[in-house]
């Protein structure tokens, strides 16, 4: 989709994190307002994306993927932002990964035409959405995953009735994990079910999500097991397209998956009927964070030879700004930032910058200082955060604080648009979200 | 606002919890589709409101409030749904309570003209929103709360510059709590600051939030302290309107606040210049829940004489439906319901109903059975829930489950619209949200 298309999307003018706008403003109008975060033209709390860091992360991951000669289908559920999907696709992503049928519809409506739905497609209401998208564009390339005979039969029957062919991937999982086939008996049952629907279902690959495991050794073991199953199944001729998709990788272990999957022989079967398409699906790299994904990137920098060669790493590009709302007693600040504004399930937001609004505009940029490390959020309610501070902290009601976050997925879904900013905190654009 | 106004709001057609709709569908179109949840015309997960239970809760709370001869300004941040604000106002609510300037703008844009912002108004970006709304409608009745001299001076200066008068309430708090004045020294400082801005600030009452306390005795003590301060301040002549607002009550202790505040002499001061306006602000009563607010209502039924007289109580009116997505190993079901679809911070969703989709539509309604009590969600990810089940459970991939929830506020904000259903699970309407 063109820039003009995105610029003409309606702005969510009756929601938070914006300045004053006409009710019928479009997304493209936001960049034209001349807003600056420090000059208080925008209502806080606000979620902002550093344009520069987004560009850095975008380029970093694409280069990493290219060096491994694999493909990238970033998990779009992280941001659910079609403007960011477009950036990812323009930078070289092969497709977009999504989690649900409505997410797929939202991406399709904003121009995405290759979707890996890394989830089971369950229920007629959801199947109807996918069937409708396939009808709307015969070139729409979609695949979802299966791990049970019951689901396979339901899909087979539905798409037989609609006269369409649904592309599916077999999902493997681990005992104690989430979805996915655990053993050979389940695999047999699923493959037998797939064989019952030769017209309406087409098996095109294998999918896993290693992120339910927490240790490298069992992850590598699982990945190797899956590769061996892929090779064995390729020999049986059950894959219906020449290119067989082998897909894995969340945002924490994509390096290990890249290593293991990129080693596999590109000719998956001895008869050379099939070529392997490795598709990795990290989603959080675009904004990164200061929590779990930061810790993952420390490991990656240390262990992965390609990341070491690339000599730099991902940067946290998503922040939430909020005001100091009250200083009701020594040692305690109440911040205008709640569970509805930022993720709180994987660590509270971390104060990173501190700014005291000035009347003299020229001083604005110079006055942002790092927030002291001992200013720490220790509890959150719907619309408030509780921050502990030293009793003699230099802090005032009305001060602005920027917060780094952990778990970008559960921060993006709190906002209907996020603002793009440059290093001077000028608002240079915005991206919409569709949750 | 009229029904027609709400019916013409655009439906969020690219988001979840809907059936197939044209991209330009309006909210009013949803009721006309003839959808039924059990007949799978709607994509799951979906958030649904029982129309009947909403009506019950609406009437119950208004009667409770009327019996105490106080006023109701339901906290709108719970639902952020203007259709529900309208229902509440039509049922007799005096106004709507909100938490932020953007929430106030969203309510104003959908017809609300009396807002108690039970929060500090901090920052020029937020003050600008309120100033703009006051400019747009001279009859817009707004008040926010203050607890610091710095904030009072910032407000005084801003509204002096804009040539407007902002109505404010003094907030009292408790040590170890959230916002609010803790002691007499702070009170003096705030009142002195208020006195510096006689043109631009008008003190019209007192506000507290007792919900940061967990025990009845300290809550009553706090409420009595606040009443004594209200009476003392009334004598000093610092309130600028004949009606003085005294406002408290979240959704857990509204009965105790009603008891304490309704006992206060309506003539607040000895000179009878001021009449007391008690305004209570529960927000969660409309949907209720099966968690903290259920426990609170048990206590209220037992202890409160008015609730006992009324002989029945609030009903959980908000549910989320989801599919059984995978049964990967004995004792474990993976449900297509994640942290992005339901609150998870105050208890996981509780399976309440179980339905196996039938091909024979006439059987649909009869086939919803209570979900076994030992089907329990024990973990959630962004898009999935993990449910423990007995190894011999009668459960299939594709089964539908309804879940009751804890903490409606953090469930509403996961949806851009919720569907209204009747007892037969027909979709009879929808309400929009503006987070």
Image (cartoon, coloured by chain):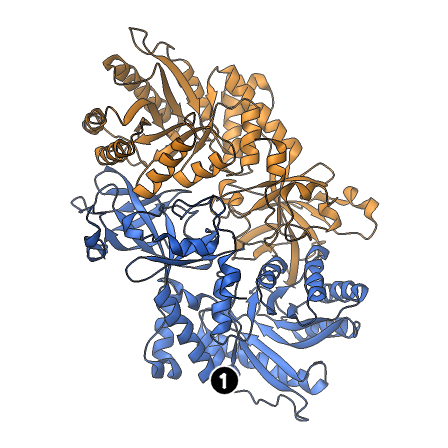
Chain colours: A blue, B orange
Residue at left offset 55%, top offset 65%: A177
> Which chain letter goes with mark 1?
A
- The residue at the far left in this view is A392
Where is residue B51? Give x, y as percent. 65, 34
Looking at the figure, which quarter contains the N terminus of chain B?
A: top right
Where is residue A301? Give x, y as percent. 35, 77
Number of marks drawn: 1
Q: In this view, does B359 lie to the left or right of A293?
A: right
Q: Is residue B346 depicted above or below A54 in this figure?
A: above
- The residue at the far bottom in this view is A271
The answer to whether residue B329 is seen in the rendering is: no
Q: Splitting the image into 4 quarters, where does residue B7 fall?
A: top right
Q: Is residue B266 depicted above or below B149 in this figure?
A: above
Q: Residues within 10 Å of mark 1 (few under 14, many from 20)?
A: some
Residue at left offset 57%, top offset 70%: A174
Judging depth in this view, the residue of A124 and A362 nearest the camera is: A362
Q: Is residue A26 depicted above or below B126 in this figure?
A: below
SS label for mark 1: loop
Q: Is residue B144 depicted above or below A418 in this figure?
A: above
Residue at left offset 23%, top offset 47%: A357
Q: Mark 1 points at which residue?
A: A69
Where is residue B204? Give x, y as percent. 33, 21
Where is residue A270? Give x, y as percent. 66, 93
């Amino acid at each position: 989709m063109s820039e003009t298309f995105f610029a003409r999307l309606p702005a969510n003018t009756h929601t938070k994190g914006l300045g004053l706008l006409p009710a019928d403003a479009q997304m493209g109008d936001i960049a034209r307002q001349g807003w600056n975060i420090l000059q208080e033209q925008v209502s806080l709390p606000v979620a902002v994306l550093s344009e520069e860091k987004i560009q850095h992360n975008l380029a970093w991951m694409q280069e990493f993927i290219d060096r491994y000669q694999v493909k990238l289908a970033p998990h779009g559920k992280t941001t659910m932002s079609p403007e960011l999907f477009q950036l990812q696709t323009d930078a070289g992503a092969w497709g977009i990964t999504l989690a649900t049928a409505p997410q797929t519809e939202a991406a399709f409506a904003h121009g995405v035409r290759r979707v890996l739905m890394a989830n089971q497609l369950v229920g007629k209401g959801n199947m109807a959405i996918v069937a409708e998208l396939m009808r709307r564009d015969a070139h729409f390339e979609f695949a979802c995953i299966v791990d049970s005979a019951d689901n396979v039969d339901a899909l087979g029957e539905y798409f037989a009735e609609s006269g369409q062919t649904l592309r599916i991937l077999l999902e493997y999982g681990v005992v104690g994990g989430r979805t996915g086939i655990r053993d050979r008996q389940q695999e047999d049952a699923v493959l037998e079910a797939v064989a019952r629907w030769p017209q309406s279902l087409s098996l095109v690959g294998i999918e896993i999500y290693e992120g339910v495991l927490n240790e490298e050794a069992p992850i590598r073991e699982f990945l190797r097991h899956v590769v061996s199953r892929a090779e064995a199944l390729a020999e049986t001729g059950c894959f219906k397209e020449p290119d067989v998709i082998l897909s894995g990788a969340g945002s924490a272990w994509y390096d290990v998956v890249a290593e293991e999957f990129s080693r596999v022989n590109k000719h998956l079967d001895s008869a050379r009927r099939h070529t392997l398409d490795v598709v990795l699906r990290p989603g959080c790299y675009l904004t990164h964070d200061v929590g779990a994904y930061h810790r993952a990137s420390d490991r990656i920098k240390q262990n992965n030879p390609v990341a070491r060669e690339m000599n730099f790493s991902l940067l946290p590009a998503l922040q939430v700004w909020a005001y100091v709302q009250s200083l009701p007693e020594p040692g305690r600040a109440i911040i205008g930032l709640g569970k509805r504004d930022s993720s709180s399930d994987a660590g509270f937001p971390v104060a990173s910058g501190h700014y005291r609004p000035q009347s003299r505009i020229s001083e604005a940029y110079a006055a942002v200082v790092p927030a002291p490390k001992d200013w720490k959020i220790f509890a959150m309610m719907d619309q408030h955060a509780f921050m502990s501070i030293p009793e003699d902290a230099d802090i005032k009601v009305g001060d602005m604080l920027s917060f780094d976050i952990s778990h970008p997925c559960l921060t993006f879904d709190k906002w209907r648009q996020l603002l793009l900013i440059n290093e001077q905190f000028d608002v240079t654009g915005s991206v919409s979200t569709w949750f």
